[in-house]
Image: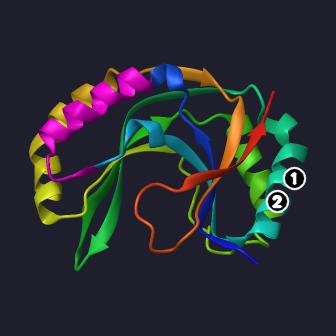
């Protein structure tokens, strides 16, 4: 049976913010030219990582999302302010992912918890604590880490001005048809929430 790789359940950033997101990314790229900046059309909020899945499992997961849509459908998300994920590098934590924070809402966390109770049997790998966010850039090199540290105040100023609001209208299941394929995973299923 056909398998898909790097699968996850996510919420796409509304197209109405595409221009604003492009401007943010251009400014970030000018401050951190060595960072791997997320393409605006790939901006999303990850809800649950699924790993490698076959098509049958993905169809079942899409059905679960459809059955649970009333838990989160129509919820308003607020996005803004900078966040940073760190990774361990020898004896220190170094910046790794620059992101926009998503305001914590009770319904969003309840949905994630409810979703995990259904989807954990499909993938045990998603044991990280849930931090709702929209990834902006990955700092994969020492040069990009240094650029982030040098311009962190400017990045904070830029991202503190961002205040996006939108209602959740759909959830996607993303995945790659080939484990070696480059680029962002494709949309495999769409589930309308309203």
Q: In this view, does 148 lie above or below 145?
A: above
Q: In this view, does 181 lie above or below 147?
A: below
- Foreground residue among 146 and 30: 30
| Gap in angstroms between the C-alphas marked 2 and 1 | 6 Å
Image position, residue 185 (x, y; %) = 52, 56
Q: Residue at x 43, y 26 (%)?
A: 18
Q: Which residue is drawn at 52% across and 42% down?
A: 44
Q: Is residue 175 left or right of residue 90?
A: right
Badge 2: few (under 14), some or many (20 or more) residues near its Cα, within 10 Å?
some
Q: Helix, strand, or loop for circle 2?
A: helix
Image quarter of residue 146: bottom left
Image position, residue 114 (x, y; %) = 80, 52
Magenta stretch, overall SS: helix
Tell whether position 27 is magenta: yes
Q: Is residue 160 left or right of residue 75?
A: left
Image position, residue 67 (x, y; %) = 90, 46
Q: Is residue 75 left or right of residue 177?
A: right
- Total labels drawn: 2
Q: Residue at x 16, y 32 (%)?
A: 154
- Foreground residue among 34 and 101: 34
Q: Helix, strand, or loop for circle 1?
A: helix
Q: Which colour scheme is used?
A: rainbow
Asked if the residues shown at circle 2 and circle 1 are in contact, with their CB atoms under 8 angstroms apart, the answer is yes
Q: Residue 63 carries which label?
A: 1
Give the quadrant of the N terminus.
bottom right
Q: In this view, does 73 lie above or below 142?
A: above
- Foreground residue among 149 and 189: 189
Image quarter of residue 182: bottom left
Q: Is residue 51 above or below residue 17?
A: below
Tell whether position 153 is magenta: no
- The residue indicated by pointer 2 is 59
Q: What stretch is highlighted in magenta?
A: 18-36
């Amino acid at each position: 049976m056909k398998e898909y790789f790097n699968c996850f359940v996510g919420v796409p950033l509304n197209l109405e913010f595409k221009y604003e997101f492009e401007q943010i990314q251009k400014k970030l790229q000018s401050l951190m030219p060595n960072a791997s900046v997320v393409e605006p059309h790939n901006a999303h909020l990850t809800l649950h990582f699924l790993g490698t899945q076959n098509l049958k499992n993905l169809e079942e997961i899409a059905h679960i999302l459809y059955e649970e849509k009333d838990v989160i459908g129509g919820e308003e998300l607020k996005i803004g302010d900078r966040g940073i994920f760190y990774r361990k590098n020898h004896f220190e934590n170094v910046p790794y992912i620059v992101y926009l924070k998503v305001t914590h809402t009770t319904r969003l966390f309840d949905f994630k918890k409810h979703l995990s109770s259904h989807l954990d049997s499909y993938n045990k790998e998603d044991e990280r604590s849930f931090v709702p966010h929209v990834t902006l850039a990955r700092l994969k090199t020492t040069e990009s880490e240094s650029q982030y540290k040098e311009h962190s105040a400017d990045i904070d100023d830029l991202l503190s001005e961002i205040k996006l609001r939108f209602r959740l209208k759909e959830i996607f299941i993303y995945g790659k048809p080939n484990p070696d394929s480059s680029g962002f995973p494709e949309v495999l299923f769409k589930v309308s929430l309203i």
